[in-house]
Image (cartoon, rainbow, N blue to C red):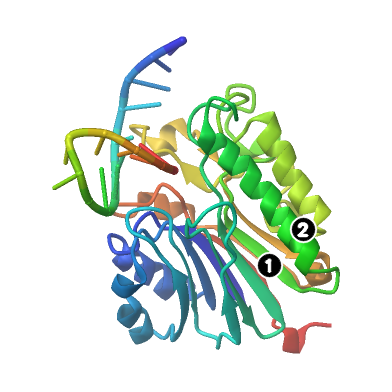
Amino acid sequence: MKIVTWNINSIRLRIVLLEQLLMTHNPDIVLLQETKVINDLFPADALHEIGYRHLYYQGQKSYNGVAIISKLPIDASFSIKLYNDDKRHVAVKIGDLEIHNFYIPAGGDIPDINENPKFRHKLEYVQLIQEWFKANRNQESKIILAGDLNIAPLEHDVWSSKQLSKVVSHTGVERAALINLQNSLGLIDSARYFIPAHEKFYTWWSYRNIDWQKSNRGRRLDHIWVSKNLQSRLIAIEAVVDARNWQLPSDHVPYIVQITDETISV
DNA sequence: ATGGTTGGCCTCCAA
C-alpha cells in the first residue's frame, strides 16, 4: 500500500500534475495540503474518473485547505479544529489505519512569538496536536501522522543548518517542538528510518531560486510518521524529486511511503 | 546582509 503526501499549492491550478502523479506512481491514498479551494469547487469528478472514488476534504477560500483522496474505502472521517478555524487537518480511517493529514502553519518570517503572531500560532499548533493525541489516542492506536509540517527538524534536513538556524522552519525552538511531538507520541519518522541522519534529504525547494537544482537549497518540510506498531510494515520511501521540474510545479514535491497491507503483515 | 518567486485575489497577503 502506497501513501503519498503533497503540498500541491492550489489543486485547481495543478490538477493535471496531480493526475500525472497518480498515473505514474499509483498511490492508494493521497494527502494534499494547500488545496486553496472551497469544498463546492473541489475537483472531485476528475478524481473519481481516474479511480479515486473516496474523498474527504476541508477547504477554504485562498488559503490552506487539506484533502484525502483514496482508492480504498474510507470507513470514517473527521477534522480537528485547533487554534482557529483554518482548514489544516483531516483524518480518515481506512482498514486498520487512522491517517491524519496536517498542514502546520508556516509561521511568518520573524522567529519571535512576541513580535510575530504567526510564529506563536505555529508553535502553539504543534503543542495542540500533541495534547489532542495524548488525550484521545494511545499506544495501541495504529496512527499515520503526515503532511506539510513546515519544520525541518534535523541538521541534514536542510542545505545549511548553520545558515538556517534563525530562519523559520529550522530554528531551535521549532526543531525541538517537532522532535518532541514525534517522540512523545511514539511515532517513527519514515524518511529517517530508511535514510541515515548524515545524508541530506529534502522535499521542498523555494521558488526564489533561479535554478533550484543547481543551488539545491532544499528543506525537508513534508513528513510521514507511523506509530511503532506499524514500524515492521514499512517497506520503502521516496521523494518524487523530478516533480519539482514538472511544468508549473509546486515548491513541494510528493513524498511517498510504502507499507504492507494489514492482510499480509506478520 | 539581502532579495529572490508564486498563487489567489482585489491591489496586497501568505508562503
Q: CA distance from mark 2 to mark 1?
A: 9 Å
Q: Which secondary structure lies at badge 2?
A: strand
Q: Name the one closer to the observer, A237 or A132.
A: A132
Decide: marks 2, 1 in contact (CB < 8 A)?
no
Crowdedness of circle 2 by 10 Å Cα count: few (<14), some, many (20+)?
A: many
Q: Which secondary structure lies at badge 1?
A: strand
Chain under numbered label 2: A
Identify the residue at horizontal 53%, vertical 34% (top origin). A117
Q: How many marks?
A: 2
- Disc 2 or 1, which lies upstream in sequence? 1
State the quadrant of the N terminus of chain A: bottom right
Residue underneath mark 2: A188
- Residue A94: where, in percent of width, then height? 63, 82
Per the rendering, the mark at residue A144 is 1
Whether residue A24 sits left or right of residue A72 in the image: it is: left
Up the image or down, A67 lies above or below A223; here it is below
- Residue A135: where, in percent of width, then height? 79, 64
Q: Quadrant of residue A210?
A: top left
Whether residue A120 sits left or right of residue A23 in the image: it is: right
Crowdedness of circle 1 by 10 Å Cα count: few (<14), some, many (20+)?
A: many
State the quadrant of the C terminus of chain A: bottom right
- Residue B15: where, in percent of width, then height? 44, 43
Identify the residue at horizontal 64%, vertical 41% (top origin). A123
Q: Name the one closer to the observer, A160 or A13.
A: A13
Identify the residue at horizontal 63%, vertical 25% (top origin). A165
Identify the residue at horizontal 75%, vertical 45% (top origin). A179
Name the amino acid type tagged 1. Answer: Ile
